[in-house]
Amino acid sequence: MMRIILISTVLFHPGFLYSVHATIQKPNILFIMLDDLGKEWISCYGAEDIETPNIDALAAGGMKFNNAYSMPQCTPSRATLLTGKYPWRNGYVNHWDVPRWGVGYFDWKHKENTTFARLMKDLGYKTCAAGKWQINDFRIEPQAMKKHGFDDWAMWTGWESGNPPSGERYQDPYINTPAGSKTYKGKFGPDIYTDHIIQFMKEHKKDPMCLYLPMTLPHTPFVVTPDEPKASSKLDRHKAMVRYIDKLIGKLVNALEELAIRDNTILIFTTDNGTVGSITGTLNGTKVQGGKSKEKESGICAPFIVNCPGLVPAGKVTDALTDFSDLLPTFVELGGGKVPEDLVVDGQSIAPLILGKEKDSKRKWIMALGFGPAKVDQNGVKPRDPFTTRVIRDKKYKVWVSKDKKMVRLHDLTEDPWEEINLIESKKEEHSIARGKFSKILYSLPDKDARPLYQPRASNPWDARK
């Protein structure tokens, strides 16, 4: 009898009920990021040369963003979303392919490089990543993913200089897991990455999960897919790769439904930057050349869709501003936590917006930077220029900023979405006000960008020398 009374007291204690409720309500997060694909290849954004029905279904049943910025290239986007810091702060202002060029690496030893995965683990989440990493060399740091906060992983290592098999991310892919790196003969890489995430979900469906799927598709080389083995031209192969992406999205959604966790999993779909420049698509009647590595909206204004039945309002299209620096604080708030006070982040959480509690984000402006490859000197990896070119925009206006820290272009995106009319010399009052606003933002930024933070180490034969 005494045991029953004690159990009853514990079960009905207000604190215990809150704890149980919080555990039940803590949502899973599945963050999917494509590699090199602009809006002109997603049909719900107006793409006319392809159909992406599974991605479109996410938008129809969730929230579609019109004004979400990635960074313009691979490394800056990845470092920004992992740390919540802009490239000028985290040092990854240019692309740097660590396995191929060595020297630098994304180092967990520095507090400033804390990832969302580590913070989510602190909140009780199980974490998994699968796809493209490329910002550590797994030959040097075999447990890099674990040290960055991931419980499990299946990552294409990136092309490891001196190791030809490692260049394969699609057919016969070379993949690193907790067991080590090896070639998966006869397999198609995107299937392995997706299946790894699904298997992790099966094993941890009763736990809160934070899942990171940085897809390798549709980055070059343009390859045939298992569904379209006869695709021959570059454009046909690109289309086949995009259709395969859409198929994998459908597979992931089906897995969530079969595991009965669909309505407690916030799925975020986006891309790391625009399409490669050799591919042109049609967007709402306009031919759009791929904008990867470019300042134009086609290079950085990413497709961004959030979906979770019952948690994220359905059928919503928003002009709210957000960029990749917002992802870390958003994940943490969704997980019921707060960003540590001693951890500096540039982003602001959009959790209230995507959960339908607010109608707009807190952002008054967003920024993108990270063009071209980095350089190396006697002290290691360094920014290509002391101050990296960048773009800053609000819902109406956008400025281009030169490496001299001067505004060189001003565009009214509501009237000139293709950025053809430069208003930087305009005498109109509204344009003067816009320039004044962006001048204040620009003045608040340091004159010199940071270098990547890592501990110097012994050189390797493949380390870059220029």
Image (cartoon, helix red, strand yellow):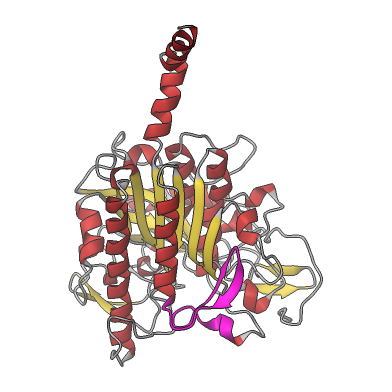
Above or below, 204 against 72 in this view is: above
- Expressed as whole percent of the image width and height from the top left, the position of residue 192 reads 43, 70
Q: Which residue occupies 30% across, 74% down?
A: 244
Give the side of residue 215 with respect to residue 84, left or right: left
Residue positioned 74% across, 69% down in the render: 380
From the viewer's perspective, is residue 302 above or below residue 310? below
Inspect the magenta stretch and tell me whether residue 75 lies in it.
no
Residue 319 location (% of width, % of height)? 28, 49
Evaluate whether residue 211 shows in this view: yes
**Considering only vertical position in the picture, is 28 above or below 375?**
above
Q: Quadrant location of the C terminus?
A: bottom right
Frontmost residue, 229 versus 416: 229
Relative depth, front residue between 289 and 156 = 156
Report the quarter where the N terminus lies. Answer: top left
Name which quarter of the figure residue 97 lies in.
bottom right
Where is residue 291? Give x, y as percent: 39, 73
**Residue at horizontal 65%, vertical 49%?**
112
400 left or right of 249? right
Question: Bounds of the magenta span?
Answer: 165-188
Residue at 44% over, 72% down: 216
